[in-house]
Structure formats: C-alpha cells, structure tokens
Amino acid sequence: MLRKDFLWGGAVAANQCEGAYDEDGKGLSIMDIITAGSKDTPRKVTLELKKEEYYPNHEAIDFYHRYEEDTDLFQEMGFRCFRTSVAWSRIFPKGDEEEPNEEGLQFYDQLFDTLRKKGMEPVVTISHYEMPLYLVTQYGGWRNRKLIDFYVRFAKVLFERYKGKVHYWMTFNEINSTVKLPMIAGVRIQPGEDAKSAAYQALHHQFVASAKAVQLARQIDAENHVGCMVMTTVGYPKTSHPLDILAAQEYLRDGTLFFTDVHVRGEYPKYFHSYDVNLDIIEEDEKDLKQGCVDFIGFSYYSTQVVSHTNEGEEAQGNIVKGLKNPYLEASEWGWQIDPNGLKFLMRVLYERYEKPLFIVENGLGYDDQIVEGKIEDDARIDYLRQHIQAMKEITEQENIDLMGYTVWSPIDIVSAGTGEMKKRYGMIYVDKDNEGHGTLKRMKKKSFDWYKQVIASNGENLQ
Ligand code: BGP
C-alpha cells in the first residue's frame, strides 16, 4: 500500500507552460531565445530575439493567464500536489539585481494560494532550465562562482515570501544535464577549451548553491523539505561480456548516482578522482556541501537504454542521454524506450544506496494525440502510466521504500523541452495549439483524465 498522504499530482516547468514571457517585468530567460525544433531538427539558440524565428516558449499554453481554469481541472482529478517551477527571470529579470520584482512575486502568491485553496500542495523547483539570459551573456552562466550568490539570493526571497505556502522544494531540475548539455546551465564552451572541466566546474557551483539553499530553507522554516532532482540513466548491458557489464554499471553511476552521491552525502565520492577534471573547490564549499544534504531524492524516469563497451548497435533516443536499442522493449514515437521494470531497478538501487525518501517527480508518455469524433482516446498513455504506477507500487511494497509521491509529466499538454514541439503531448488535458503556434488554446479532457482521477481516488489501488 502506498502511504495515505501520498503526493499524487502532476508536474510542469514555468517556461514550458506559463508564456507571458515579457509581461509584468519579466526578463528574458535562456528558454526565450530557443526556437522550435522537431524529432529530427534540433532547437536553435539565437542569443537575441529574431523576428523571423518562432519561439514556442513565449506564449507556451498561456498558463500565466489561465491557471484558474487549469488548476480547476487538476482539482477535479483530485491532485494532492502540483509541481511547477518559479521563472527566475520573473523575480530577478536580469538575475543580479539587489531587489526582486514585486509583480513576479505576486503571480506566484496567487498561484500558490490558488493551489492550496484547491487542496494541492505546491512542489516547487527553484531552477528548471530557465535562468535569466543576462547571467549567461554577462557572467558566462554557471561557470562563474558569482552565480552561487545570485541563486542563493533568489532562493532566500522565495523561502521568505512563500513561507507557510510551500513546504516542498527542489533546488535544480535534472542537475545532471549540466554535464551532458552545459548550455542549459548557460555554459558556452570555447574552441580548444577543456570542455569537461568547464562543465563540472559549473556543476560544482550548482552543488554548492543547492547546499546553501538547503541550509537556508531549514533556517527559514523548519517545515521545509528540500530535495534534489536528477534525471535517471538506467543502461542494461548489451551482452554478458564483462566489459558490457562494467559499461552499464558506469552508465548508471556516472550518469545518475554521482549526482545523488554529492547531494545526499554532502561530499564528492572517492571515485570522482577518475573523472580527471580540474576544479576550483574552496574549503567553504566543502563545509557547505556537508551541511546542505538534501531531505529527499526527486527524479525523472521515462525510459532505459542498452549499453555496450564497443558502442556498436542501433542508436536509441532518450531524455538528453542516448544509448542503444533494446530488442525486448517498445518505444514511443520519439524513440524513448518504454520500460516499467527499469523503474523498479532504479528505485531499488536508489533506496538501497541511501535509504532516503524518494519522490517520482516526472514520468509520462509523449504522444501525438488525435481528436476523433470530438474525443481523445489516449489508451497508449493510460497503458504507459498504468504499467509504471503498478511497477512503482510493487517495488515500494516489496522493499519497504519510503516513497513520497508521484507526479505525472505533464498533466496538461505543454511545450516539449527537448524538441520545442506541441505535438509531443504528455497531458491528460489537451491544449488546442500546434507546432507552429496556431490554435485557440482551448482545453479538453482526454480519456486518461478520468482514469487518473480514479487512480488517485483509490490511492493507486484501482488502475483499470
Ligand atoms: C525532462 C525535463 C522536462 C520535460 C521532460 C520531457 O528532461 O525535466 O522539462 O520536458 O523531460 O522531455 P521532453 O519535453 O523533451 O519530451
């Protein structure tokens, strides 16, 4: 049985749903200068706004003006929590100001009040792929140590302002993306530069910023729970060749566990020396890391990969990380392999290693839903969610895992982070908008809406 106060809900990120990219004093964020792409064409970063380009995050699904209606629908599904992020550039438009933007703060006051009124606990990611652009152009992003102070100032403002309204926080969304995709942390690698060290330096600054935020959150409100958030990388060995086994072990350790090791244990693991990077770590950083260990482990889980020491085989797509195809698994239209058993594998590893509460804060299926005779029968999504929730329940019960909650990515169709498409839909609520930005933005329930409602009402017992 899942715990009685299990946090069922849905998850989004501000930049993928709010829109209103230049309203009420908001500054530009890095997502505001990224164009739309597709499965086969990567999104482009333009660094300044260009008239001829289409930027899907500018309007997104206009949650900024429609959150009343949307949260009504979440309430109708019985959500006990709702995960979103605070757009940093609404609060600090450039990122280095001394004082926050009051209008930005008011928006989240209203949103969090609304959620609480409707029975949902806000779960807030402090930074979700949306740092102010100015911090990139002026300071070089997270490679600059100054970013720690800017972030901590931002976090402090949030903890003070939303004290009593928000009790669940996560410091950085998928912090491991910083080393896979340094541009997401505002790091632009110069030709000839030691790219690996630059990325790990940026990551180090984020680790320290996270640890300082954890300490502050506790000082400001003893009822705060602060977690990390990692993207998870499960890779199965392609064969029983011992080198494939080792490659798969490293894929999980270096892709996921290294990050949770630092967040949970408050120090770099011994094996870190094998990464062969040059970092500037000061004594104070080490103290901060030790004092800022997280309370829980939040993670995203979508799919798994196959790993071979020779790298030979057919390539498979995935969430930021890639691997090889698994002949035993089906994949989504975007090539993400569907593997509920991988979730069991992962939860077992994480809980055995740390015995810290876990929180599944992203899981879902991107699918190009079609309206047929006025209805959307998204059985593929229901199947995906059913299998993953079943796996989650089984492993939780079997191994006595302390699992805090499960939030579907995403309860409503939003702009895809990876491709910028609208048609890579995750929602249980459809939004009338296409890849080119046309549509009425009208909301419509899919079949999965009632299905998820009954799952929550039965605390996960009724998955039919
Ligand atoms: C995670 C991100 C989200 C999200 C999700 C789905 O990486 O935390 O922001 O979008 O994956 O990915 P995508 O939108 O690329 O399908």
Image: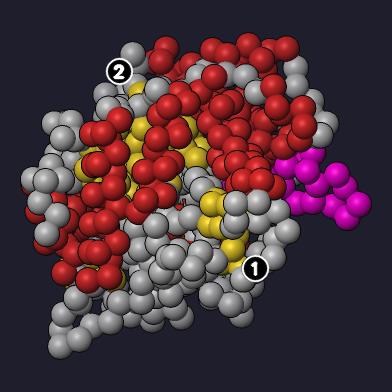
The residue labelled by disc 2 is: 223
At x 53%, y 75%, the residue is 39
Residue 302 seen in the figure: yes
Q: Is mark 2 on a helix, strand or loop?
A: loop
Return the residue nearer the eye: 301 or 73.
Answer: 301
Residue 463 higher or lower than 224, as above or below:
below
Check disc 1 and give the amino acid type. Answer: Gly
The boundaries of the magenta stretch are 175-199
The location of residue 272, given as percent across then percent down, is 71, 28
The residue labelled by disc 1 is: 313
At x 85%, y 52%, the residue is 190
Q: Residue 151 carries which label?
A: none
Judge the density around disc 1: few (<14), some (14-19), many (≥20) Cα neighbours within 10 Å: some
Query: Extreme bottom residue here?
Result: 373
At x 25%, y 64%, the residue is 383
- Image check: 370 left or right of 5? right
The location of residue 124, given as percent across then percent down, is 37, 38
Check disc 2 and give the amino acid type. Answer: Glu
Return the residue nearer the eye: 361 or 86.
Answer: 361
Residue 119 higher or lower than 180, as above or below:
above
